Image (tube, helix red, strand yellow):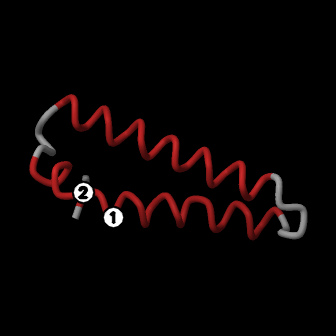
């Protein structure tokens, strides 16, 4: 899937698909951190954008 996305970055359908996929992944991460009671708010909101940026880096490059 990553190779297909890399090859068709200029395609609008692929861009919409990847953004939706990244949004779903971000939502899953948010829910997993939200329902974990042990982590503090600072840790939760630090790791969430970090994971999202890592996924963006993997998909774009």
Instruction: Indicate which disc residue 2 carries.
Output: 2
Q: Residue sitting at 25 percent across and 52 percent down?
A: 1
- Measuring from the top left, give residue 40's x and y in whole percent: 85, 67
Q: Is residue 60 left or right of residue 45?
A: left
Q: Residue furthest front?
A: 1
Q: Residue sitting at 66 percent across and 67 percent down?
A: 46
Task: Place residue 45 in its image quadrant.
Answer: bottom right
Looking at the rendering, in which quadrant would you find the C terminus? bottom left
- Measuring from the top left, give residue 30's x and y in whole percent: 67, 51
- Measuring from the top left, give residue 36's x and y in whole percent: 83, 61
Q: Residue sitting at 32 percent across and 35 percent down?
A: 17
Q: Is residue 22 above or below residue 44?
A: above
Q: Is residue 1 left or right of residue 28?
A: left
Q: CA distance from mark 1 to mark 2?
A: 11 Å
Disc 2 secondary structure class: helix
Q: Which residue is mark 1?
A: 57
Disc 1 secondary structure class: helix
Q: Residue sitting at 25 percent across and 37 percent down?
A: 15
Instruction: Indicate which disc residue 43 carries.
Output: none
* Foreground: disc 1 or disc 2: 2
**Closer-to-camera residue (17/45):** 17
- Measuring from the top left, give residue 55's x and y in whole percent: 41, 60
Q: Is residue 57 above or below residue 31?
A: below
Task: Place residue 38 in its image quadrant.
Answer: bottom right
Neighbours of disc 1 within 10 Å: few (<14), some (14-19), many (20+): few
């Amino acid at each position: 899937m990553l190779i297909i996305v890399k090859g068709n970055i200029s395609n609008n359908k692929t861009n919409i698909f990847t953004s939706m996929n990244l949004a779903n992944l971000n939502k899953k991460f948010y829910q997993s951190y939200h329902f974990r009671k042990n982590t503090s708010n600072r840790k939760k909101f630090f790791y969430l954008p970090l994971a999202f940026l890592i996924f963006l880096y993997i998909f774009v490059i």
